[in-house]
Image: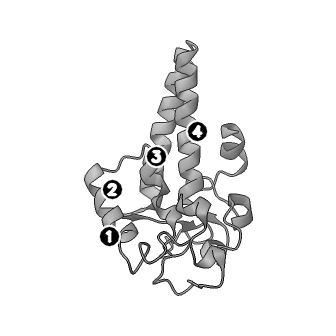
Amino acid sequence: NTRWWLTQRMTRYGLVGTSSGMEEGWDNTPRFDKGPILTCDINTYLLIQMMACAEFAEMIGEKQIAAESKTMADKYARKIMDVLYDRHENCLKDVLIATGKKMDLKTPANFIPVLGPIPLSSDKARQMIKKYLLDESKFYGEFPFPCVAYDEETYSCDSWWRGPTWVNVAY
């Protein structure tokens, strides 16, 4: 599976891209309104998968494969930070593949990389969570963790993937 993503979906940015919310399980998300993107969540899941492969190889005594997998994961983690991390805003952002521009749209997917082994200090991660996820005007309102931040233009209380809490995303 890792090889498939890396050979079939690799972009010029060194991260994999996706073309629709349906492919990601985000259905009608506004994240894809402007076209295919490098997503924070899929790239993090791939990174976590790389780390798991390294651990499995280590468990079965495949030292060389474990070392190669770990090196690949470390490079990928740095690439996630290089491409998706906005240092000025201290936030990870999806990126439009066509232009390379970071998207300002805030969704819970922006914070998935914090769960992975990315080179982000715990201090910066805490600041990010406090600034965005725990802000009532963004994500921590009456029903925490909407699919799109409450203060986004694309937020709609009538559309699950553009507004209210969707259990699997909030979880």
Mark 3–mark 2 distance (CA, rounded to whole Å):
11 Å
| Residue 144 visible in the picture | yes
Q: Quick one: label 2, few (<14), some, or many (20+) residues within 10 Å?
A: some
Q: Callout 4: 10 Å neighbours few (<14), some, many (20+)?
A: some
Pointer 3 with pointer 2, Cβ within 8 A? no
Secondary structure at badge 2 equals helix
Mark drawn on residue 116: 3
Q: Nearer the viewer, residue 10 or 61?
A: 61
The alpha-carbon separation of the residues under discs 4 and 3 comes to 10 Å
Does label 3 or label 2 sit earlier along the sequence? 3
- Chain-order first, disc 4 or disc 3: 4
Disc 1 designates what residue? 131
Instruction: Identify the residue under disc 2.
Output: 125
Whether residues under marks 1 and 3 lie with C-beta atoms below 8 angstroms apart, the answer is no
Q: Residue visible at 53% across and 73% down?
A: 146
Circle 1: residue type: Lys
Disc sitting over residue 49 in the figure? 4
Callout 4–callout 3 Cβ contact below 8 Å: no
Labelled pair 1, 2 in contact (Cβ < 8 Å): no
